[in-house]
Amino acid sequence: MRNILKASLILPIVLLLNLELLISPMIRHEWGAVELFMRFFCKSDDLTRMGVLAVFLSVFPLLIFVIIFGTFVYSDLTVSSIYLFSRQASRGGWYLKTVLRLGIYAAVSSLWFSLACRYLVYGFTGGEYRFEITAKLFIMSFAITFGFALLQNIISIAIGTTYGFFATYALILISIGAAIQTLKTNTTSLLARIFNPFYSLILAAFNELTIPQLFISFLPVGVILICGFSAVKYSDIGLSNKELI
Amino acid sequence: MNIIKTEALKKSIKGALVLNHVDFQMESGKIYGLVGKNGSGKTMLIRALSGLMRPTEGRVLYNHLELYKDIDYIPSLGIVVENAGLYPEFTGFKNLQILAAVQKKITDEDIKKAIARVGLDPEDKRTVKKYSLGMKQRIVLAQAIMERPDVLLLDEPTNALDESGIEIIRNICREEAARGAIVLIASHNKEDIESLCDFKYRMEAGRIFGFD
């Protein structure tokens, strides 16, 4: 229950960061959905003025999840790891159960984020593609929260929490920068367009993300899952955190 | 009768050989002692036997099943390892409840009995972070014995304990061996080993020798 509440912290943060949209429903009548999503994600209606910081602030509620749950898997491996692990039938089974719990919390966070986005842009009613857009936003938000939280956990398992945190956030900032660059230049590079979850998230908001693209965007999450399984299966428990050596 | 056996066990960490060709065997109902200085490899051996540390070479067999291949862990294992802790924000009882929930073999009453057996109060509402070092050592021992394991591996179990605590450890080791468990005690203190163990070994630079 405590973790569900932590995952739900995203809702008040999204609303707080978008107070203008929240308290001025008049804006919805003046702007179309595309312009509203631009204001939501970029804090500007001018694509050429889109900046990394503005987009970072817009997706920051999702990144709060990464901060809170970035050591969720890792902590079991270090705090009470030896006594927990010596009771498990298999490491793989433990990993899958733990990752499933992380996935549930990521889904809760993503649901709040996508619903808040939808409300801020469309209000309670209105909008031709509101369900489709909300669903795609939810899926891409989940890919970001779950994928980056798991990544931070795995890097922490492999080389320590400090490196895990900085490496994950460096990758997040690079991904956001790359997403903005892709939007501005309209590059056709598959790597830039499909494998960047932040680019896919913005496309989802503008209802330009196709179903095949949605599935392909999940491939990096699958890779991270497999890497995590290997890290847990083959690492030395209690020794993988270098502080213990 | 349960048997744990190591065959040419080697472990390298960052280029250093922490276990070097370790061959030995343990059987049910006996107490085995391992003495050695800090850094001799006692803790590493216990971790390797527990399924926590994959050997670089060699193997660990439990009743002819190979650890890290046929099984991930010894099915019924109690372990006390130096520098391993519990959740500081929970009480001793809550910590043991969390651990007991993994295998679901025992009841809350069994947990309370284990806590009382090590000389602590099962109703103590203090969190583990408020425990003294001796109390932490005792609650860690309680989690090792609460499920009545077939194998009990104790790394420096008498650390931070007073005379009464040390006597409790000795009695528990004798009782568990009498019940049929394999008991291994690793200690840098020779007296712990000499007074208690049926078989004694010495570890030095990752190698195991007979005790002189």
Image: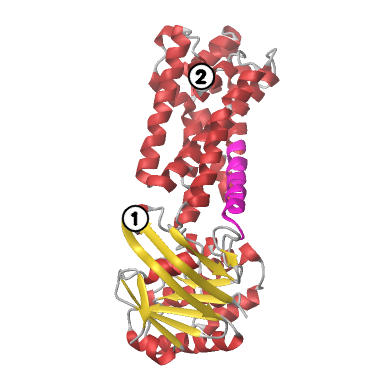
* x then y, percent, for residue B148: 60, 78
> Badge 2 is on which residue?
A199
Q: Residue furthest bottom?
A: B195
The residue at 55%/88% (across/down) is B175
Q: Name the side, left or right, on which B203 lies relative to B109.
A: left
Q: Specify the subunit that label 1 lies on.
A: A
Q: Position of residue B19 (x, y in %)?
A: 37, 65
Q: Secondary structure at mark 1?
A: helix
Span shown in magenta: A89-107
Please say whether residue A76 is visible from this viewpoint.
yes
Secondary structure at numbered mark 2: helix
With respect to residue B96, does A186 lie above or below? above
What amino acid is found at the position of numbered circle 1 in the picture?
Glu
Q: In this rendering, do the residues under marks 2 and 1 share a single chain? A: yes
Judging depth in this view, the residue of A100 and A51 nearest the camera is A100
- Image quadrant where residue A205 sits: top right
- Return the x and y of residue A212 as percentages of the image width and height: 65, 19
Q: Marks 2 and 1, Cα distance to the nearest angstrom? A: 37 Å
Q: Which residue is mark 1?
A: A243
Which circle marks residue A89 in the picture? none
Give neighbour class at mark 2: few <14, some 14-19, many 20+ (Cα, 10 Å). many
Classify the position of the C terminus of chain B by image quarter.
bottom left
Residue B180 sits above or below residue A53 on the image: below
Residue A229: name its quadrant: top right
Residue visible at 47% across and 33% down in the picture? A63
What's the amino acid at mark 2? Answer: Tyr
Res. A43 visible in picture: no
In the image: residue B193, left or right of residue B68: left
